[in-house]
Image: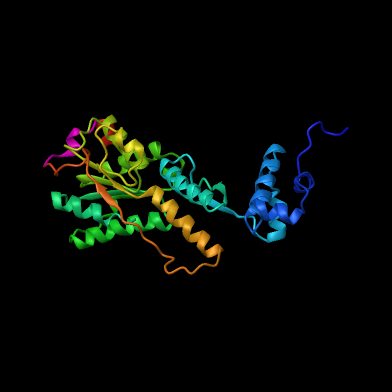
């Protein structure tokens, strides 16, 4: 039994307009000159017939589907949502389709210098593992470089790099905080590879009745919207998220279209956003503030 609703084809448009298929194609794609009145008639007929180009067929003919894939590790992450937004806007303007792929699974040196300037000498660090993730690795390297530049010793006891953070930032952050607070010499500030981790750290410290920033300061990275709703407001490093998407997609499309590309390795500037979660270090023994049951945990 034939379907009641027939999908219009380019042949239907050509037949209705009384022109060749190639003329319809040229009019719709602006690939070759078509008389103004003819083009207007074709566009009107195509609209009335609800005609939409067959992307697969067109791709086979032109050897280009004009589709690009944007691959992100976590679509629910507000950071990547902003990057995707920038990429999609540019792709649409340049007449490309965007295919979104989720894999589920930059440098933070500017931040270390700021903390050292306030007088912090013990700076903890919590991060995801960074295998095959250059940006996360660069943040950690920035932390290490910042320590070196300020003549501070790297202490592995106050550094936690855990795969568990990818599965659950809040719970993983709590476990990382427990590990750091159980070390002999507790840091006066905890830096984090992302704002999501920092939110978990803030929550864990509050559960332990540790005041932020009076007793321990907290620093995030990414400046996501959530950082404006923590208590206290989160000091973090801002990245131009939307501009990252715009820059990346423009670079990709220029390469696809064989345009001359001067620079492929583009680094956009970051900015330290100072809010309320960081203060000058205070001389106090955090161990005396922790519950006895917590101190006994390993």
Q: Exactly how many numbered labels are in the figure?
A: 0
Tell me what residue is drawn at x 61 percent, y 55 percent: 66
Magenta-colored stretch includes residue 109: no
* Quarter of the picture holding the N terminus: top right
Quarter of the image holding residue 50? Answer: top right
Q: Which of 148 and 21 is in front in this view?
A: 21
Is residue 59 depicted above or below 165 in this figure? below
| Residue 109 drawn at (x, y percent) | 26, 57
Residue 286 magenta-highlighted? yes
Looking at the image, residue 203 sits to the left or right of residue 149; the answer is right
Q: What stretch is highlighted in magenta?
A: 283-291
The single residue placed furthest to the left in the displayed view is 283
Pick the quarter of the image with the C terminus: top left
Q: Residue at x 55, y 67 (%)?
A: 258
Q: At which x and y percent is residue 280?
A: 14, 44
Is residue 104 something that shows in the picture? yes
Q: Would you place residue 285 above or below residue 292 in this image?
A: below
Residue 123 lies, in percent from the top left, at 23, 50
Residue 139 shown left or right of residue 214 in the figure: right
Location of residue 295 by image quarter: top left
At which x and y percent is residue 265? 41, 65
Between 26 and 256, the residue placed more toward the observer is 26
Task: Find residue 170 and report its image quarter.
Answer: top left
**Can residue 131 be spotted in the picture?**
no
Residue shown at the point (39%, 56%) measured from the top left: 135
The residue closer to the viewer here, 113 or 68, is: 68
From the viewer's side, name the closer residue of 118 and 270: 270
Coloring scheme used: rainbow
Q: Is residue 56 left or right of residue 125?
A: right
């Amino acid at each position: 039994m034939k379907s009641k609703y027939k999908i219009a084809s380019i042949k239907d448009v050509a037949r209705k307009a009384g022109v060749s298929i190639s003329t319809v194609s040229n009019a719709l794609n602006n690939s070759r000159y078509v008389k103004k009145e003819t083009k207007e008639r074709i566009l009107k007929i195509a609209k009335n017939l609800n005609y939409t180009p067959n992307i697969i067929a067109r791709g086979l003919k032109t050897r280009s589907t004009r589709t690009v894939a944007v691959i992100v590790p976590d679509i629910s992450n507000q950071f990547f949502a902003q990057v995707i937004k920038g990429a999609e806007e540019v792709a649409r303007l340049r007449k490309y389709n965007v295919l979104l792929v989720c894999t589920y699974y930059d440098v933070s040196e500017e931040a270390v210098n700021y903390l050292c300037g306030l007088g912090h000498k013990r700076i903890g660090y919590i991060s995801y593992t960074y295998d095959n993730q250059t940006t996360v690795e660069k943040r950690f390297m920035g932390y290490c470089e910042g320590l070196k530049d300020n003549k501070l010793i790297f202490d592995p006891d106050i550094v936690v790099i855990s795969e568990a953070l990818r599965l659950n930032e809040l719970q993983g952050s709590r476990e990382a905080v427990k590990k750091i607070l159980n070390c002999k010499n507790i840091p006066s500030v905890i830096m984090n590879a992302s704002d999501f981790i920092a939110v978990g750290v803030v929550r864990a410290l509050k559960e332990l009745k540790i005041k932020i920033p009076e007793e321990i300061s907290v620093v995030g990275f990414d400046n996501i919207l959530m950082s404006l709703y923590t208590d206290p407001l989160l000091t973090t490093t801002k990245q131009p998220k939307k501009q990252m998407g715009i820059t990346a997609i423009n670079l990709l499309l220029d390469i696809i279209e064989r345009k001359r590309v001067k620079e492929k390795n583009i680094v956009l500037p970051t900015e330290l956003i100072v809010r309320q979660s960081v203060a000058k270090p205070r001389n106090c023994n955090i161990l005396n503030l922790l519950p006895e049951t917590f101190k006994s945990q390993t």
